[in-house]
Image: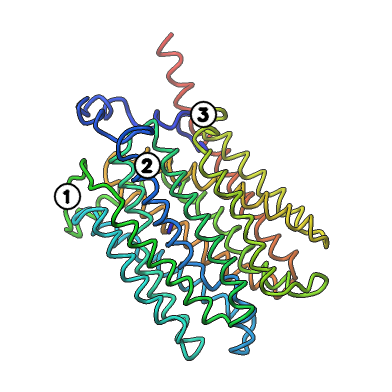
């Protein structure tokens, strides 16, 4: 807050046409940030902190849903709207915010988004009703919409192509740390002082991340202001949606997040009920498995280098599906193992797909990333709501069923992309001969 091949080349950098690469002056290419070079660590840490703040705020109520249900006297499906509203607000506003970043700059929009989001965070603990809480969470999600697309566009412009997957992976790793720390901290704080104090503590942490982000992020050197004219924006969006590869990547991001949103919205209810009956603090600590996502996201570049994008997506999907099935057992160690596999598979798949979007779009990168983020968070909202409804109707097995269907969709899309890629390649072979 929030870096597989579905038909593109197996090497990430190869998804940019050679004509585009050749048109970039060598002086510009050499001046981009690269691992070990000046400014790279500051940039990485700044965006890592932005990712921490984004996910900590965006999912600050997810581990607290059983307590929110108890205070307001509502079912899981109603309380889940405090999560779905935030991710839905982000999904709706990410495209307009990306247009603002094209005009006013990535760093400016990201800073403004964090300032507004943390300001709203001050009000969230004082929400008098569930309706007011949902409304504030929607506004908070809308404010955070300026971060994910702008961050990936910033990286695509300021980082050398060969280091892009790794850089975006670090940003996604910040997402995982934010999501983990937010849930763990809120779990233990809420156990002693209630969910309102827990949400307030997350707001304070986000303020610190926002200040450090603004101080550390290097000024952009390769940003060129674009147009805010609606006709230009509409044409850019239409071009992206006409690109089959981008559309497949958008669908993959949405499906992966449907799994993740459903699982982590419902897991608190499952673990506080029989046969586990865990206290709120222990349930919050379950989210330490997000550290697995930090590792899998940050190593996505090496995964693509070894397996290609398609291979990385198959591995991520298979890992996620295995985790879903393992989590069906009424054994706490097996449930934890299942969550580890789900988390590792999700973050790896997300990092590979989101970096592929940034590399595939050679123009209008902010809009391309915004469309991915919009699909991604629509998947989160869908997963949170449908996963909670499935849990109400069929227990944990119902939530797992929704997740397995989503993973099957990822595999189907990837297979289709593989066949689509082989068609042009086979057509070129006779001509080359």
Examine the image and state in which quarter residue 363 appears: top left
Of mark 3 and mark 1, the one earlier in the sequence is 1
Badge 2 crowding class, 10 Å Cα cut-off, few under 14, some 14 to 19, many 20 or more, is some
On residue 305, which mark appears? 3
Q: Do tag 3 and tag 1 residues touch (Cβ < 8 Å)? A: no
Q: Nearer the viewer, mark 2 or mark 1?
A: 2
Residue drawn 37% across and 38% down?
359
Q: Is residue 238 above or below residue 113?
A: above
Up-down relation of residue 288 to residue 408 (above or below):
below
Q: Which element is circle 2 on?
A: helix
- Mark 1 highlights which residue? 225
Contact, CB < 8 Å: mark 2 with mark 1? Answer: no
Q: Which quadrant of the figure contains the C terminus?
A: top left
Quadrant housing residue 163: top left
Q: Secondary structure at mark 1?
A: loop
Give the number of the disc on residue 262.
none
Q: Earlier in the sequence, mark 2 or mark 1?
A: 2
Q: Residue at x 72, y 48 (%)?
A: 322
Separation of disc 3 and disc 1 at Cα? 33 Å
Residue name at image x 52 percent, y 80 percent? 197
């Amino acid at each position: 807050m929030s870096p597989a091949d579905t038909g593109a080349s197996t090497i990430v950098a190869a998804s940019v046409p050679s004509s585009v690469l050749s048109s970039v002056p060598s002086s510009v290419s050499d001046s981009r940030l690269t691992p070990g070079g000046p400014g790279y660590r500051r940039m990485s840490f700044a965006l890592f902190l932005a990712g921490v703040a984004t996910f900590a705020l965006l999912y600050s109520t997810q581990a607290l849903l059983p307590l929110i249900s108890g205070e307001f006297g509502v079912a899981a499906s109603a309380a889940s709207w405090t999560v779905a509203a935030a991710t839905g607000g982000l999904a709706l506003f990410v495209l307009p915010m990306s247009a603002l970043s094209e005009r006013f700059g990535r760093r400016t929009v990201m800073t403004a988004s964090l300032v507004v989001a943390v300001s709203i965070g001050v009000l969230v603990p004082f929400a008098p009703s569930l309706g007011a809480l949902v409304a504030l969470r929607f506004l908070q999600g809308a404010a955070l919409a300026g971060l994910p697309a702008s961050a990936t566009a910033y990286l695509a412009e300021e980082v050398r192509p060969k280091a892009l997957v790794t850089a975006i992976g670090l940003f996604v790793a910040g997402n995982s740390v934010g999501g983990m720390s937010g849930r763990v901290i809120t779990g233990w704080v809420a156990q002693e002082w209630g969910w309102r104090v827990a949400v307030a503590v997350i707001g304070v942490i986000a303020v610190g991340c926002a200040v450090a982000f603004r101080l550390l992020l290097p000024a952009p050197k390769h940003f060129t202001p674009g147009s805010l004219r609606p006709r230009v924006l509409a044409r850019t969006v239409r071009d992206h949606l006409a690109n089959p590869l981008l559309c497949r990547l958008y669908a993959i991001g949405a499906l992966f997040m449907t799994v993740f949103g459903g699982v982590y919205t419902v897991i608190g209810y499952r673990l506080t009920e029989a046969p586990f009956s865990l206290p709120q603090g222990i349930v919050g600590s379950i989210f330490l498995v997000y550290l697995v996502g930090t590792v899998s996201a940050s190593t996505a570049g090496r995964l693509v280098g070894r397996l290609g994008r398609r291979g990385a997506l198959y591995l991520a999907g298979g890992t996620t599906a295995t985790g879903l099935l393992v989590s069906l057992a009424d054994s706490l160690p097996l449930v934890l193992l299942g969550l580890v596999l789900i988390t590792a598979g999700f973050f790896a798949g997300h990092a590979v797909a989101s970096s592929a979007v940034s590399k595939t779009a050679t123009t209008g990168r902010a809009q391309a990333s915004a469309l991915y983020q919009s699909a991604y968070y629509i998947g989160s909202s869908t997963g949170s709501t449908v996963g909670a409804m499935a849990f109400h109707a069929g227990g944990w097995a119902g939530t797992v069923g929704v997740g397995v269907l989503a993973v099957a969709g990822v595999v189907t899309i990837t297979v289709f992309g593989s066949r689509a890629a082989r068609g042009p390649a086979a057509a070129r072979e006779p001509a080359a001969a």
